[in-house]
Structure formats: C-alpha cells, structure tokens
Image (cartoon, coloured by chain):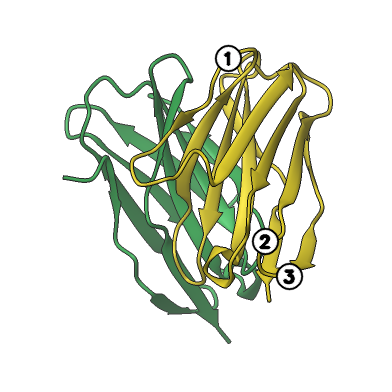
C-alpha cells in the first residue's frame, strides 16, 4: 500500500535555531499533504494544508511565518519551524491522501521535536 | 460544534469483552469515513474504512449511519494488544479536508 515517509523521526535543537522536517509520499503523487502537531494525550491538531505548487493553507492560530511549508513537488512537502522555542516542542506528523485508493489518508512516522 | 466528536473514554474492559465506540459528525456533506488506531507516541494507522453497507474485518466491525450522522466501531473478543487510542476521521470536499475526532482511549486488561 501507499507509504508516507517522514524525516527526521526525532530532533533536538537549541532555542532560536530552525528545524526542517520532510514528508515524502513514496509510491503515489500527493498534490495535497497535511501537517499536524500533537501534544501528549491529545488528538492531532491540523496546522496547515500543503498544496503542490501553491501556498499552504494555514489553520486559524497557526503562524505562517513561524511554520514555513513548501510543497515543491508531487512527492515532497517540508515544514520548517523557524526560530524554534521550547514551546514548539511537540510531535509533528504529516499525512497525504492517496486519491486513487478511496481517499485514504496515510501518515508519516512523525517527528518528535525537542527545543532546549 | 466540533466537526467530529468522540467519547474520549477511557474505556477499561477485560480481555474477551466486546466494546463499541461511536463517533458523530456534524456536516451532512461528509463523504468518507475512517477509523484509525494510534499507539502511544506513534503515528495513526488506518484500521478500517467505513462503507455505507457496513464492513467487517475479523474482530472489527464498522458501521455508518448517514441519517443520524454517526459511525461506529465494534471490537469483539478484545485482546490486550487492542489497547490504543481509536481516532474517527471524516473526509469531505473531495479529499481536500479531513476532520479528526479527539480519539477514544481503550484499555484492555487481563
């Protein structure tokens, strides 16, 4: 079945640095990918919808200048957390929809970010 | 009102029990429905798609009721390994929008 790969799976960085997370669809083309963050014991919170070749659509309350999304190809979307701070520490997950398979949503393995 | 609502639980059941989860959705234009399972600190994984006619996969049965706008998941003969959070996911706008329930926590105890 379709697979979505996310990298890195975990990252520790110093406050003020930027961190890039990649999300790839491995055997299907994804014109749309989704980025979520998840705090402990809480559900996924959609941050933004990444659209290939155009600007991402951000959910209310998510700072677009803080969380830069680039969807340069049909198989790759990146999320960059700029000037990360400890409150940005979270589990970030991407997903992509394989429309050829009844629209099922496939998730990346997630990236655990810890900002010191 | 939330797009998708689930009872957060936790549901604490003994091994072998039958347990049912419900999930309601608010928008009648919703098109596709899914149950995902999420283990602690892992990404969600698709458990079942939910079809109008209902579908079964081993010990798991999913039902859709469009008139009442809810979907259900029934787990029979619960195993310890079924302990996880079960997420209800609803799609509309031709797969451009996905909405998640808050998840229902299941604890299966020996």
- Mark 2 secondary-structure assignment: loop
According to the picture, the residue beneath numbered tag 2 turns out to be: B42
Of the two numbered discs 3 and 1 on the same chain, state the one appearing first in sequence: 3
* Chain identifier of the yellow chain: A
Which residue appears at 66% of the width and 28% of the height?
A: A70
Check residue B107 in the rendering and tell me which mark sits there, or answer none. none
According to the picture, the residue beneath numbered tag 3 turns out to be: A14
Which residue appears at 78% of the width and 62% of the height?
A: A10
Residue B58 relative to residue B102: left or right: right
The C terminus of chain B, quarter of image:
bottom right
Chain identity of mark 2? B
Residue B69 relative to residue A71: left or right: left
* Residue A44 position in % (x across, y down): 48, 53
Which circle, 1 or 2, is nearer the viewer? 1
Which circle, 3 or 1, is nearer the viewer? 3
* Chain identifier of the green chain: B
Q: Do discs 3 and 1 belong to a common subunit?
A: yes
Residue B53 relative to residue A24: left or right: left
Which circle, 3 or 2, is nearer the viewer? 3
Q: Nearer the viewer, residue A39 or A68?
A: A68
């Amino acid at each position: 079945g379709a697979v979505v790969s996310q990298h890195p799976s975990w990252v520790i960085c110093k406050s003020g640095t930027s961190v890039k997370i990649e999300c790839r669809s491995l055997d299907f083309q994804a014109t749309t990918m989704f980025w979520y963050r998840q705090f402990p014991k809480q559900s996924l919170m959609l941050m933004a919808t990444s659209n290939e070749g155009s600007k991402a659509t951000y959910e209310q309350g998510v700072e677009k200048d803080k969380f830069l999304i680039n969807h340069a190809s049909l198989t790759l979307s990146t999320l960059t957390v700029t000037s990360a701070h400890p409150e940005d520490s979270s589990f970030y997950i991407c997903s992509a929809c394989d429309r050829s398979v009844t629209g099922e949503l496939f998730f990346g393995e997630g990236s655990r970010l810890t900002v010191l | 009102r939330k797009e998708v609502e689930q009872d957060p639980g936790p549901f604490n059941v003994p091994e072998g029990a039958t347990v049912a989860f419900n999930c309601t959705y608010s928008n009648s234009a919703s098109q596709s429905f899914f149950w995902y399972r999420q283990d602690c600190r892992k990404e969600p994984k698709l458990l079942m798609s939910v079809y109008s006619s209902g579908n079964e996969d081993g010990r798991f049965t999913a039902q859709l009721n469009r008139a009442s706008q809810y979907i259900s998941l029934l787990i029979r003969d619960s195993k310890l390994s079924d302990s996880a959070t079960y997420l209800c996911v609803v799609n509309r706008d031709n797969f451009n929008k996905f909405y998640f329930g808050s998840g229902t926590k299941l604890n299966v105890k020996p």
